[in-house]
Image (cartoon, rainbow, N blue to C red):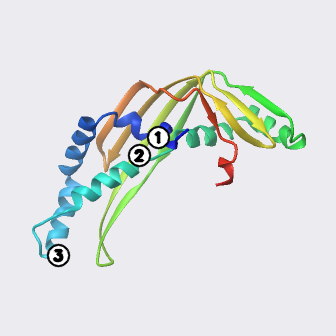
Amino acid sequence: MQKRDRRVEDLFLSDDKERQRAYERLAKHKSVEKLRENVEARSGSVAFEAAKGMERFMKELLDIDLVEIFMQGWKKYDAVVEVLARSKKNPLKKYFVALSKHTLRSRHRPGLQVEIEGIPVQRIDFDVDLKLELEGFVLEIKNGEIVALDSGDCRADGKVNCEGVTLYERHSQKLYLPVRFDLEGENDE
């Protein structure tokens, strides 16, 4: 399975038209306008090529692994923590944990620091907030690690803000995930 199958980007930007609208909203944002002015003033050039760089940054901004969000949340859940500990004592045995309906929340605060010739010009801050409602997931645990998961239903709400302005927003978006994620060996990376 490719990691591309489990990115937050697909929740917000499902097609090229949507992606283009988001970039246009960002290009009109006051922080980007200010950045454009700062760059033009410092470089003495009217040409501003940051649009391509911003598009790359926006893609990276949402390059967040959904399964990593799931794993971070589940490793705080008492029932999972107990089985993880028990599985270390019997490393050859596989354990399965069926999870009831639950919600995971995840917050990310990336930023873009722009520099010209090593001198900081401006920073643009973003907020990525997610709420994932999960039901019917089953974890496979072995030797203190979650080695696989069978996915169930997943609905997501999310919002991406740039300094108080909403760039993307989704409510109750059904996420179509692969039926099974084999994670053995991924914890070593």
Q: CA distance from mark 2 to mark 1?
A: 7 Å
Give the image location of residue 44, x and y in percent.
12, 76
Q: Say which element carries label 3.
A: helix
Q: Earlier in the sequence, mark 3 or mark 2?
A: 3
Q: Is residue 94 left or right of residue 24?
A: right
Residue of label 2: 62
Q: Are marks 3 and 2 in contact (CB under 8 Å)?
A: no
Q: Are marks 2 and 1 in contact (CB under 8 Å)?
A: yes
Task: State which mark lies toward you, 2 or 1.
Answer: 1
Q: Which mark is residue 155?
A: none
Q: Is residue 110 left or right of residue 132?
A: left
Q: Residue lying farthest left? A: 46
- Establish if 97 lies above or below 76: above
Q: CA distance from mark 3 to mark 2?
A: 30 Å
Give the image location of residue 80, x and y in percent.
74, 34
Q: Say which element carries label 1.
A: loop
Say how many tags the image has: 3
- Establish if 45 lies above or below 92: below
Give the image location of residue 111, x and y in percent.
38, 57
Q: Which mark is residue 7?
A: 1
Q: Earlier in the sequence, mark 2 or mark 1?
A: 1
- Residue placed most toward the observer, 91 or 70: 91
Residue of label 3: 43
Q: CA distance from mark 3 to mark 1?
A: 36 Å
Q: Residues within 10 Å of mark 2 (few under 14, many from 20)?
A: some
Q: Residues within 10 Å of mark 1 (few under 14, many from 20)?
A: some
Task: State which mark lies toward you, 3 or 1.
Answer: 1
Q: Amino acid at mark 1?
A: Arg
Q: Residue at x 89, y 39 (%)?
A: 90
Q: Amino acid at mark 2?
A: Leu
Q: Amino acid at mark 3?
A: Ser
